[in-house]
Every structure is written in C-alpha cells, then in structure tokens.
Image (tube, helix red, strand yellow):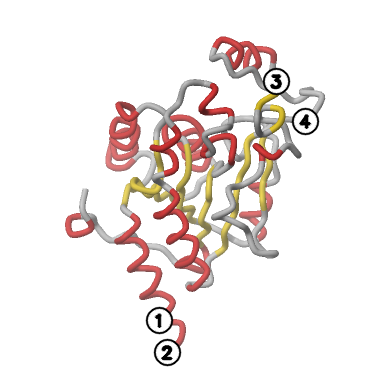
Amino acid sequence: MSSADTPAVRFDAERTALLVIDMQRDFLDPRGYATQAGVDVSRLRATLGPVCALVAAAREAGMHIVYTREGHRPDLSDCPPAKLERSRHACAEIGSSGPLGRLLVRGEPGHGLVDELQPRGDEPIVDKPGYSAFHQTELDQILRGWRIDTVILCGVTTEVCVHTTLRAATDHGLHCVTVGDACAASDPALQQPALDMIAVEGGIFGTVTDSESLIAQLRHSANKGLG
C-alpha cells in the first residue's frame, strides 16, 4: 500500500504513544537468537529505517515513546517450560550461550536494543517475559499515567510480538495503529496476512498505515504546535 492510497489516521499526539517492539540485537543482529532459530534477520533489519524515522518524527511532535525488550531473568524463573521447550525445538534454546551472550536473557548483549535505537531519558524501556508487552509488565500503568488513548505499533516480529501486543492493547480499550512497513514477520509469507487480519470486521484491531503517511501527519502536528 502506497502513501497515496493510505487513509489518514486520526490521533491526538498528546494522547498517543509510539510502541517500539523488540528492536533488540537478539532479533536484528546476525549473531543473535533469531539467526540461531533459522530466521533471515536481513528482513527484520529492513525495519530499522522506517522505525528510526518514526521515532524522530514522534519526538518532534512531542509524542510519548515506549520501547520493549523480550527476555528472561538469568535463572529463567519467568520462562514457562513450554516456551523453553519450543525454543529448544527451534535450535535456539533460551538461556543457552551464543556470540551475544545467553539467548534472550536480560542483561546480556543480545538482549539490548540495537545501537541505532537508543532511548532518551524520558522514554521508558519495558522488559517483558512474554510476547505481549502488557503481560507481567508495567506498560498499562505507564500508558494510563500519560492518559494515552491511542498506540502506534512498530517493530518485530509482526505475527508474534507485534500482533500479540496489538490484540492486548485492543482489549485494554486502546485505539491501535500498526505501521506496516515498520514491522517485519519472521517468514515473509506471514507479513501481509498478519496485516490483513487487522482490518477485518471494519478494523477489529485498528488501522494499518505506512511510515511515510504517518510521519507526514506527525510533522504536520509538530508544525501546528509551533504556530
């Protein structure tokens, strides 16, 4: 979908938060978890340009930004046995050693955000043990404190952590906007179906847009604020 035929998304920048989902070395660095699990991370890394541009535009518009990281405590006490078993079957067992330290373990180099995305002091990082950014985290409290009613989602992967967070956000009563070209699926065949699911039943999970259209709206919002 091009920006020319993408409908404008309505939002109030002061009541909207950009959620940057799991842009970590474990998922985007060729030495991390995703590569070990057989994922072509070059497709995931293709989101970096749009995501960085979104972050810059959101900052300019005065919008709140939250980053998430998936990972577990060093003793894996917050990693369900079923999840650990699934990672073992994928040949990327959580907690095992890799070039970027123990896979998907908090505090290891692989758990950190990529160098291109470094939060400012007022941009929180939410560490999550599951796929949803709302599960066993303080995200809901943060958004309520800011009086957020709309979230914009970008990051990886579209069909897992982005979609799981999107569905949870919908259940929390939030309006949701997913930026299609700022997300990537682990399998390219899953990308478009994952985006198509959002629009069923008149937009049951919100709206899909593209980064170019959204950035133009954010810049317009920022310019209005200067007037």
- Is disc 1 placed on a helix, strand or loop? helix
Q: Is residue 76 left or right of residue 6?
A: right
The amino acid beneath tag 3 is Ser
Q: Residue at x 66, y 50 (%)?
A: 125
| x, y percent for residue 63 | 53, 66
The amino acid beneath tag 2 is Gly
Any mark on residue 227, and which? Answer: 2
Mark 3 and mark 1 in contact? Answer it, CB < 8 Å: no
Q: Residue at x 66, y 34 (%)?
A: 100
| x, y percent for residue 226 | 46, 86
Q: Residues within 10 Å of mark 1 (few under 14, many from 20)?
A: few
- Is disc 2 placed on a helix, strand or loop? loop
Q: Is residue 82 left or right of residue 52?
A: right
Which residue is the site of mark 1?
223
Mark 3 and mark 4 in contact? Answer it, CB < 8 Å: no
Q: Earlier in the sequence, mark 3 or mark 4?
A: 4
Mark 2 and mark 1 in contact? Answer it, CB < 8 Å: yes
